[in-house]
Amino acid sequence: MSEAKWMEQLQHILDCPLRQFQLPVQAWKSNGSGSNRGTKASRSANAAKAGDHMAGQEGLIWFALRVDSGSITALEVGKEQLSDTEKKLIGWMISLKAAGTGAGANVSESERYARELGSWIAEQLEIPDAKLSVPDHLMARGRLFSSMIPFLLVCEQAEAVRSSYTELEKLLRSFLAEDVMLIPLKEQEWLVLSPVSLIRDAQSEDRETEQEESVEESLASIAQGLQEMLSSEWIGECHLAVSQPMSPASSIVATTALLRETIHLGRTFHMGANIHLPWLLHLERLLSTIPESQRARFVEQALKRTDFFLEPEILSTLETFFSLDCNVSETAKKLYIHRNTLLYRLDKLKQETELDVRQFSDAVLVKIVLLLYKVTKRK
């Protein structure tokens, strides 16, 4: 598609005038002092890239189309108020065009649909009265009526996500299933929908070993394998959340919101973890609703009594103990210590703190303090 035709279509979609012009790099940088959200004013010409945007003159928005050594070819959008979603979409289209793919050229129909659906989901997540059901014009073109397993993938490394949509889709299809759906939400965030047959396949393998897993255990196992594959084969450090199978037609927005919250809670309360499961974060979800000042005050009061259980050896022991449902024998095995050694540590903890984590009420109190301490110590 020619550039003139591309601009004509974009102007029709936005329903506002567009103007293409050139300006020196210094002029671009000097205008960055306004509402510059796409690029930093201090960037050099070589650091700027197509798709960046900033406030232009008289309330207009400028987007970088091409960046040369001393000048920038910019697109001026004659619309005073662009939504964040519109800005992101325009920037994405320009970046695709600059990369040689064009705004839709050489892009498969499935990818085009996935990006359109992803943009709609992202927009719904930003507004309070979000629509729960997918609109008809998107429903008719997708496979959204079947029950599917939702994964949310978030990449840590911005530079690693420059790979093509096709490359990531190919990896997911090789590991999960051929009919997987990959839906981009943001530059470093993707929703992945996979068939529920993955659970049945995992459980069939377990029957052969006479150790049948629950649905949640199967989902956790699939997520673990997927995260390890992606970390080693494609994007390096990444976070992955998964939830129970759902019907995308009616639940895709709510489920995506749940998975986003799950990753946020996991990264907040369990630093170092990369797999985040919503059914294991109920207590964390409750604690996150408590105002920060009250959380800090609770921890301060608890630690005035004693901070013995924050010593490295005791802390490691408690975290393992809680992760194994307070099972003494399994905890001793996991820590490679004798059972009596573990009991000695727990008895010493009771003597120092008057809290016996083998008792339910004391275990809950210590668990809460440890979770809140992880958050407050980083403030």
Image (cartoon, grey):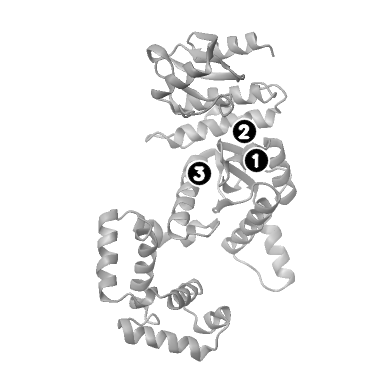
Going from N to C along the chain, the mark reached first, 2 or 1, is 2
Which numbered marker is on residue 181? 1
Q: Residue at x 59, y 12 (%)?
A: 7
Query: Mark 1 and mark 3 in contact (Cβ < 8 Å)?
Result: no
Q: Residue at x 58, y 45 (%)?
A: 157
Q: CA distance from mark 3 to mark 2?
A: 15 Å
166 or 248, which lies in front? 166
Quadrant occupied by the C terminus: bottom left
**Crowd around label 2: few <14 · some 14–19 · many ≥20 (10 Å):** many
Helix, strand or loop at label 3? It is helix
Identify the amino acid type marked 3. Thr
Going from N to C along the chain, the mark reached first, 3 or 2, is 2
Choose top left, top right, bottom left or bottom right for residue 181.
top right
Quadrant occupied by the N terminus: top right
Q: Is residue 70 above or below residue 363?
A: above
Q: Is residue 339 left or right of residue 213?
A: left
Q: Residue at x 43, y 19 (%)?
A: 31
* Residue bearing the label numbered 3: 256
Going from N to C along the chain, the mark reached first, 3 or 1, is 1
Q: CA distance from mark 3 to mark 1?
A: 14 Å
Q: CA distance from mark 2 to mark 1?
A: 8 Å
Identify the amino acid type marked 1. Met
**Crowd around label 3: few <14 · some 14–19 · many ≥20 (10 Å):** many
123 or 52, which lies in front? 52
* Residue bearing the label numbered 2: 114
